[in-house]
Image (spheres, helix red, strand yellow):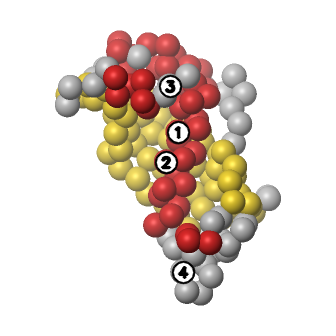
Amino acid sequence: MKLISYRRKVYYYETDALGIVHHSNFIRWLEEGRLSFFEQLGVYYHELDKQNMAIIICRVSCDYKKMFRFNDEFEIEVKVKALSPAKFSLEYEIRLGNQIYATAESTHCGIQNNKIINLKKTLPEIYELMLKIRER
């Protein structure tokens, strides 16, 4: 399965008085990239909601390398870093052209009815897809 990087432009409201993107927006962009990643796997958050299920963040970190400005067009590549039945980690590369502007990592688990689920048993198709993607 070939995954497509998430692409978008920097909006004016995401910049500060100096015209530089505020660092908090990077975390929002990770979520946008993650949603795109999951949609490509056939996982839609609104469908999980209907089953009282969610994928939650346990940890997130971001290393900022360069500054973005208004109207910069960038892309986010998302990869599976680690996977177990209880949780998984994703890694991100935020790029403008060939330049890396940030790298990040997030760790997640699945919950249903406010209890941690076994991803391998509860979402076996998605678990297997993520396993295949990670092994590449």
Q: Would you say residue 111 is visible in this rendering?
A: yes
Q: Would you say residue 84 is visible in this rendering?
A: no
Among the two numbered marks 2 and 4 on one chain, the one whose residue lies closer to the N terminus: 4
Q: Amino acid at mark 1?
A: Leu
Check disc 4 and report the residue beneath it: 16
**Looking at this view, is 7 or 135 the one in front?**
7
Going 52% across and 39% down the picture, which residue do you hit? 35
Which numbered dot is residue 35?
1
Task: From the top left corner, tell me how far across and down residue 88 is, in percent.
Answer: 42, 34
Would you say the residues marked 2 and 1 are in contact, meaning their CB atoms lie under 8 Å apart?
yes
Toward the bottom, the furthest residue is 18
**Looking at this view, is 33 or 134 the one in front?**
33
SS assignment at label 4:
loop
Among the two numbered marks 4 and 3 on one chain, the one whose residue lies closer to the N terminus: 4
Toward the right, the furthest residue is 97
Check disc 2 and report the residue beneath it: 31
What whole-number distance in Å separates the C-alpha atoms at marks 4 and 3?
34 Å
Task: From the top left corner, tell me how far across and down residue 18 is, in percent.
Answer: 59, 87
Left-right relation of 26 to 40:
left
Q: Amino acid at mark 2?
A: Glu
For the C terminus, which image quadrant? top right
What whole-number distance in Å separates the C-alpha atoms at marks 1 and 4?
26 Å
Check disc 3 and report the residue beneath it: 43
Left-right relation of 97 to 45:
right
